[in-house]
Image: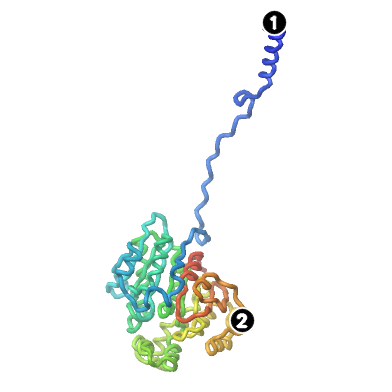
Amino acid sequence: MPSPIVSMLVLLAGILVSGCRETPTAHAEPHAPPQASTPRPAPMPGERTREPLSLIPEFPRAAGGPFPFGAQDFSVWQARIPRIEEVEINSSLDGSKQRALLYDPGRPEPRPLLVALHSWSENYLQNIGIPYGIFAERNGWVLIHPDHRGPYRSPASTASALAQRDVLDAIDYAKQRARVDPTRIYLVGYSGSAMTSLVLAGRYPEIWAGVVSWVPIYDLVDWYGWLRSNLPERHYAHEVAAACGGAPRPGTAAADECRRRSPRSHLQAARGRVNVYLGVGLWDQLVPPDHALRAFNDLAAPADRVPVEDIGRITKTRSIPETLGAPEARPLYEAAKAKVVFERTSERATVVVFQGGHDVIYNAGLSWLSSQRRTVLP
């Protein structure tokens, strides 16, 4: 048993140690109260924001895809996009009922609107538009697929005033039915409707955040001459004449009418004001590549325009002059087996020439559109 002296020494040591130990309550500095997190400001109009994007790798291109070009079947749309709707829209010009397909993701916040136009010979049920619907469903975008007076073979169709208004009416309808972000209204056209998309870009530049035009017709009069010389057995030349009130030979009223419906009469008004993406196949035998290149020149700064002699050589030889340089590799084109052979950007316009024909490279256009925003115009 320890002696009284030892016990007293142990007790004294314990008191000294406990007196030197820091405790949170007695000696530590008090913690500052937690600060409320500062909310991030909402993006300003025109500010580029990034959100996850789901592309459609199973649909690299329209040609050779699962949907035949002439197929028009609503049941196929429904099978792929169950919430797609067939709707009727009152024309604000002539009061007629115009059909369209609408996809509304039902989101509470404003969403991008994709306006997709059918090609020359088809209508609003054209099945090669289905990949746009699948893309809209995956990304929560609104989609409107208007008829704009059906196939391009009558005066009411073919980028007429009625057809243009139908596209604008479709946008208004989509805004009434769904939550649409007005700074992200996108337009995409193919072939005949690529022509219409460029006319709309020039006539209504204040609407579009971005316009994608695949293998566009730039001048109906020139295209009519090309068809007569190179594809006389096809139906397109007859349909151009039917839309314009006769064969558009030089000096005729039909030629004037065809020019009024062509991008060459309107596109310069979009220069520096609309983001435009032009894609064309080097080997396109229906609409030669000079149409897209001439459209680009209307949108580009003078120093960036493709020389006229180079445009002529590209169309004649279906090759790219070495003086135009070699483009960077573009993975989305490579995935579609459509290697880019020429690319140029100027002002707000980009033109891409790829190894291919009369085609759509879906993911390249959709990826580009997703990064565009409408800015305040001068």
The residue wearing badge 1 is: 4
Residue 331 shows up from this direction: yes
Residue 375 shows up from this direction: no
Inter-mark Cα distance, 2 to 1: 104 Å
246, above or below 178, in the image: below
The residue wearing badge 2 is: 324
Q: What residue type is labelled 2?
A: Leu
Q: In which quarter of the image is residue 155?
A: bottom left
Q: Where is residue 108 in the image (x, y as percent from the top left)?
A: 39, 54
Residue 182 appears left or right of 301? left
**Residue at 27 percent of width and 72 percent of height:** 97
* Residues packed near mark 2 inside 10 Å, few (<14), some (14 to 19) or many (20 plus): some
Q: Give whichever of discs 2 and 1 has the lower sequence position.
A: 1
Nearest the viewer among 283 and 251 is: 283
Q: Where is residue 96 in the image (x, y as percent from the top left)?
A: 27, 74
* Residues packed near mark 1 inside 10 Å, few (<14), some (14 to 19) or many (20 plus): few
Residue 14 appears left or right of 144? right
132, above or below 11, in the image: below
**Residue at 40 percent of width and 93 percent of height:** 232
200, above or below 133, in the image: below
Nearest the viewer among 307 and 141 is: 141
Q: What residue type is labelled 1?
A: Pro
